[in-house]
Image (cartoon, rainbow, N blue to C red):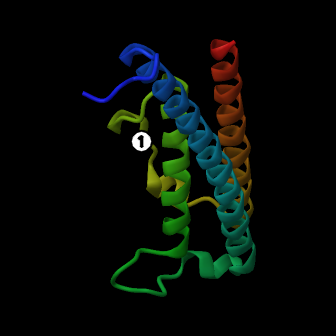
C-alpha cells in the first residue's frame, strides 16, 4: 500500500472529486457557449436561405423524388424547433413534444416562414438563457 503522506483516502478522494466537478462544469459552460454560437450561425444561414429562395420556388420539388419541397424542408426545421421549445418548457424531450403539422407549416408563405424561424430562434435562446440563470441561482 502506497503511503498517503498525511492525507486520508477520503481527503484525496474529496480533492479529486472537487477538481473533477470543476472540470465538468467548465466543459459544460464551453459546450453551452459553442452550442449557442453554432445555433446563431445555423439560424442565420437558415434565414438567408429562406430569403434567397424566390417565393414560388419555395413550393417546387427540386430534389424529386427524395424530398417534397423546400417549404417542406423548412417546415421540418420549424416543427423541430417548436418541439424543442415544448421540451425545454416541460423539462424533457419526448415524442409528444413534436406534434406540429408539417403540412400546415409548409403552406406558410415565405414571409410567414421567415417570421416563424426568427420567433422560434428568439424563444429558444431566451429559454436557454433562463435555464442557465436558474442553474446559477441553484448553485448559489
Residue found at x 34% / y 81%: 66
Residue found at x 70% / y 41%: 125
**Left or right: 70 as drawn, with respect to 67:** right
Q: Which residue is mark 1?
A: 98
Neighbourhood count class around disc 1 (C-alpha, 10 Å): few under 14, some 14–19, many 20 upward: some
Q: Position of residue 112 (x, y in %)?
A: 70, 56
- Indicate the quadrant where residue 52 lies: bottom right
User: Which of 65/19 is in front?
Assistant: 19
Q: Quadrant of the N terminus?
A: top left
- Indicate the quadrant where residue 117 lies: bottom right
User: Which of 84/108 is in front?
Assistant: 84
Q: Position of residue 136 (x, y in %)?
A: 69, 21
| Residue furthest left in the image | 1
- Would you place residue 133 above or below residue 23 in this image? above
- Would you place residue 137 above or below residue 99 in this image? above
Q: Position of residue 126 (x, y in %)?
A: 72, 35
Question: How many labels, in total?
Answer: 1
Q: Position of residue 41 (x, y in %)?
A: 70, 63
**Left or right: 140 as drawn, with respect to 25:** right
User: Which of 126/35 is in front?
Assistant: 35
Q: Quadrant of the C terminus?
A: top right
- Would you place residue 99 above or below residue 110 in this image? above
- Label 1 sits on a secondary structure element that is loop
Amino acid at each position: 500500500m502506497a503511503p498517503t503522506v498525511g492525507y486520508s483516502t477520503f481527503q484525496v478522494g474529496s480533492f479529486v472529486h472537487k477538481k473533477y466537478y470543476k472540470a465538468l462544469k467548465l466543459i459544460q459552460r464551453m459546450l453551452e457557449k459553442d452550442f449557442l454560437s453554432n445555433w446563431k450561425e445555423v439560424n442565420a444561414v437558415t434565414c438567408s436561405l429562406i430569403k434567397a429562395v424566390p417565393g414560388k420556388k419555395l413550393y417546387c420539388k427540386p430534389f424529386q423524388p427524395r424530398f417534397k419541397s423546400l417549404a417542406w424542408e423548412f417546415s421540418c426545421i420549424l416543427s423541430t424547433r417548436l418541439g424543442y421549445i415544448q421540451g425545454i418548457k416541460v423539462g424533457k424531450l419526448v415524442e409528444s413534444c413534436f406534434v406540429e403539422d408539417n403540412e400546415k407549416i409548409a403552406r406558410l408563405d415565405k414571409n410567414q416562414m421567415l417570421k416563424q424561424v426568427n420567433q422560434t430562434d428568439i424563444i429558444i435562446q431566451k429559454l436557454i438563457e433562463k435555464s442557465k440563470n436558474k442553474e446559477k441561482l441553484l448553485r448559489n
